Amino acid sequence: MAVLTYKCPNCGAQLIFRPESQHFVCDYCGSHFAQLELDKMAPVADNHEENKSREQMEETVSYQCPSCGAQLMTTGTTAATYCYYCHNPVTVSGRLSGQWQPDAIIPFSVSAEQAKEKFMQWCKRNPFVDRRFFSESQIEKLSGVYFPFWLVSGKSKVAAEATARNIRIWVSGETEYTETSVYSLIREGEMSTRDYDIVALNREETTLLEGILTYDYSQIKPFSAAYLSGFQAERRDQERSDLEEQVRNKMREHATRLLQESFDGFKTISLHNCDIEEKSTDWKYLLLPAWILTYQYHGKKYFFAMNGQNGMVNGKLPVSIWRMAKLFGLVSGISFILLTIGGYFL
Amino acid sequence: MIKRVLCFFICLLLFINMIFPVAANQQRVYDDADLFTVQQETALEEKISQVKEQAALDLVIVTALSTGNKDAQAYADDFFDDGGFGMGDDNSGVLLLIDMGASEVAVSTTGYGIRLLSDARIDKILDEVVEFLIDGESALAAQAFVERVADYTSQDVSQTVSHAENEQEKTAPLQKKKTIGQTMAQMLPISLLIGFLAVGMLYFTRGKSGETKQRPKSYRSYSSLLLCRKENKLVDKHVTKRHLPRTSSPSGDGSHSSFGGSSTHVSTSGKTHGGGSQSFGGASTHMSRSGRSHGGGSRKF
């Protein structure tokens, strides 16, 4: 395995992907490149000595930065990162090729500045958050990460039988009539599921990613490692076989819900049998952009995630009791003064 | 944030202003029963303003054809309170009500009026007023009332002056201090409640930024169902009958008893004027609807 860097064809410095322009930029000579131009260039592989062993694959692995030679520490799933010393973007080649090669990618559209601004807005919306919390040093920790996802599409044959009862009651004179109508319902059809997204990385903070799954998959791009430069990327640790059961259950849930919707106009419904037969499924492995922040507050861990495509936010903010008390005191104090003055002179 | 807080307080102040309207009314003769001529009214107004200046005592004359469902005393008390009459901090004043509907006369006193007009004096005034009214001389009755009160104030002039002086010098700041304390005590729980409500509202609208583990997209945006067979077959239909016994519902009749009857006005009390043993020098007082204490009495004619 080797670490890769995309070098500027004009000056040889590292190229970085800019979400605002969707272009690759060289910070040193100011050159711009589109994806197509870059594909013609081969990434420069630095075949420095690798401290690799099979056991270390899942553990922490260290590499040498191709630019300054510093040691880069990565976890077993890190696919791209940057050098902590010279900020040189580095892609771990083996983690994104072969079976790990993603089928597609959605590049970042939200830049670091926009992400910081959005994070600040989100924090300020809550008046009870400790001010230290959205300090500059905290925001510096906001990092752009490409997370591994499975995108499942498929078709299933659906068949269901049910009995429905409708009851009508009316009164005529001194007699009450109750009419019961029993229906036999049959439904057969095909359910198609498109782009069901599921996180392929089992970590504490990835559960939060479900809350920002509003990616527009029409914006999907064929994978190119060049998009990763300047960002971090993770490799999947959840295989298709690990998630198949979960996805199948989800499909069943969707099917029953959709069937139930088709039984409209009936009061009581009892479902006899519901057959769902998977006909075809297509699993795509792709990398999706997210800005994330992990923080500790009073011994508790908090996560924040933002959709790197549209800026949607999910996360939990630590509520400071002290700020709450201060606000309470302020409002009460001002009302007390105003009310006393008002009540005395009027 | 700060803008919102400011907005909130401005609204609050406007609200307080609406509750306490400023009374700048100079009218003192309210001839709703049309007993006086215009000249008589102006004469009475003039006399009243003289008394007001000399004795720091407000006089009001009210005639009415009906007092609604209040008794004359309560009507007099409320008329005084609601009209915002009275002078000084204790709203000193005397009000005469001539109710032509029930043929009743009532006197209501407040503040210095209570101290000036003991029950015995009120009796005397009422005797005189009623005598004129029986003869149909309502203008003279009102005039007699004003003159009688003016007489009492001039007899009491030494006290009146000191009362007026006290009003401006000693008692005024003393009483002010007391009312500041009172208003503060009153406003403290209200402001705490406002603070609590404001923080609570903010917390529930913006403070609870809990993370969602739920997907923002619903199952409908992932999956769609295309049905090739959809059958709703009616397999059975039956009707059952039940005889409804005709019963009279007693509950409907019983509920009527709860209507009516209880529309009493809580604190409209005391047209009696018996006991002379009160600390106000023989003037018995009672509370009016607005919580102020009034003296006075009433008489049928």
Image (tube, coloured by chain):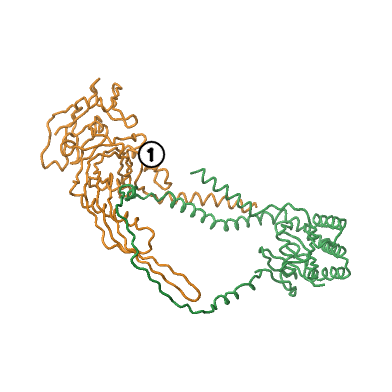
Chain colours: A orange, B green
- From the viewer's perspective, is residue B89 above or below residue A100? below
Q: Position of residue B48 (x, y in %)?
A: 82, 57
The residue closer to the viewer here, B157 or A99, is A99
Residue A232, by quadrant, is top left
The residue closer to the viewer here, A51 or B177, is A51
Within 10 Å of disc 1 (Cα), the crowding (few <14, some 14-19, many 20+) is some
Q: Is residue A297 left or right of residue B13?
A: left
Q: Is residue B52 left or right of residue B263?
A: right
Q: Position of residue B54 (x, y in %)?
A: 81, 56
Q: Position of residue B129 (x, y in %)?
A: 84, 68
Which residue is at a point 25% across and 39% down the rendered structure image? A287
The residue closer to the viewer here, B148 or B267, is B267
Q: Position of residue B166 (x, y in %)?
A: 73, 56
Q: Is residue B12 left or right of residue A106?
A: right
Residue A314, by quadrant, is top left
Q: Is residue B250 left or right of residue B226?
A: right
- Judged from the image, the secondary structure of the residue bearing numbered disc 1 is helix
Q: Which residue is mark 1?
A: A118
Which residue is at a point 24% across and 29% down the rendered structure image? A86
The residue closer to the viewer here, A27 or A25, is A25
